[in-house]
Image (cartoon, helix red, strand yellow):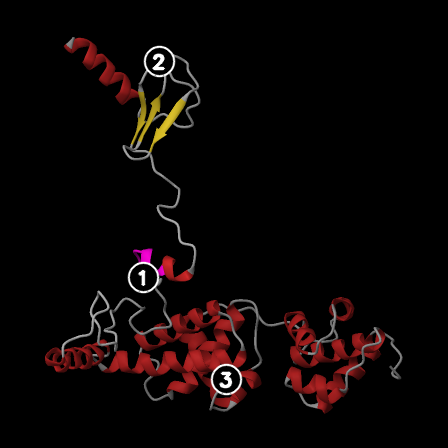
Amino acid sequence: MECDEVTAFSKTREKVEVDDVEFCPECSSSHLEENYERGELVCADCGLVISENIIDHGQEWRGFDTEQNEKRARTGAPITYTVHDKGLSTEISWKNVDIYGKSIPARNKPQLYRMRKWQKRLRAANAVERNLIVALASIERISSNMGLPKNAREEAAVIYRKAASRDLIRGRSIEGVVSASIYAASRQLGFPRAIEEVARASRVGRKEIGRNYRTLVRELRISLLPTTPHDYVSRFCSELNLGNDVETRAVEILKSMDEGSSNVGKGPTGIAAAAIYIAAILCGKKRTQEEIANISGVTEVTLRNRFKDITGALSLSADL
């Protein structure tokens, strides 16, 4: 009897590592049952344990609204670089209730108040963390004004943290380094913003942003490709409420310009704005030079100059 038990046990152990089992190796039955409570794959006919420690990939509970999901969740918010402590610290609620929802006795409220005060102080225990609190709040504010997505804010926070760890903040304004980090992050992720746009959303000038940006690129060895007019067409058309036909026509104009290489040494935003201006006229959805200049962040003079360059290079009528 002991020999049979050992043989059965050895058979079970041999089949623990079998993957994608469709038939029982003992009786060739296809009637297999997964017992998630015991973590076993069992043959329903002969009772052989085919595999052990299987993983249940299904949801352990169901929530029918947001409140139920929050109550049953066993994990907190994900790690984020947009918070100085990466969101890993705890926070004492200002509601004077216990875990059961009952009101805290009056004699315990002063003690709870002191706990909140010291917990808030300890979240920023040194100058580096206090600097990060101010800087990351500025990143959120500027990014929100510019309409940047969450991944751009995360990338800008990572760049600023690297700059702080390399001591590149010393002697420079927090707002200037933050603006440069946002400018670098937007370019790195493939949806660049002009320095003028970052300057309008922040409290620093374009010269300071450019100076800090060059420092970050040099010291942090950030590899960035130069921006092209194609990178701006989609966003400019969207902000001008122009359709896909105008965007497609503008891209065609830019491709024709690329073949002639007549846009070398000129700002990509001005070329993109002029291409959109021409495409809008050709598609019967004309926008004024002032509207396009305000959206693209260039002057009307620059727009007219790029317009002349494109019409001359492509032999288009100047009376568009």
Question: Which residue in the protein does label 2 denote?
Answer: 26
Query: Which callout, 3 or 1, points at the residue further toward the start of the chain?
Result: 1
The C terminus sits in image quarter: bottom right
Q: Are marks 2 and 1 in contact (CB under 8 Å)?
A: no
Q: What residue type is labelled 2?
A: Glu
User: Quadrant location of the N terminus?
Assistant: top left
Quadrant of the rendered image containing residue 234: bottom right
Q: Residue 210 carries which label?
A: 3
Query: Residue 76's mark?
Result: 1
Q: Nearer the viewer, mark 3 or mark 1?
A: 1
**Is there any visible trace of residue 231 in the rendered image?**
yes
Judged from the image, the secondary structure of the residue bearing numbered disc 2 is loop
Side (left or right) of 187 relative to 168 = right
Is residue 91 depicted above or below 194 in this figure? above
Does residue 72 show up magenta in the picture? yes
Q: Is residue 2 above or below residue 126?
A: above
* Residue 156 percent coordinates (x, y): 43, 73
Q: Which amino acid does label 3 sit on?
A: Gly
- The residue positioned 67% from the left and 76% from the top of the image is 236
Numbered range of the magenta stretch: 70-75
Q: Give percent across and percent down for residue 2.
A: 15, 11
Local crowd size for mark 3, using a 10 Å CA cut-off: few (<14), some (14–19), many (≥20): some
Q: Where is residue 95 in the image (x, y as percent from the top left)?
A: 25, 76
Residue sitting nearer the eye, 300 or 55 = 55
Residue 61 x/y as whole percent: 36, 48
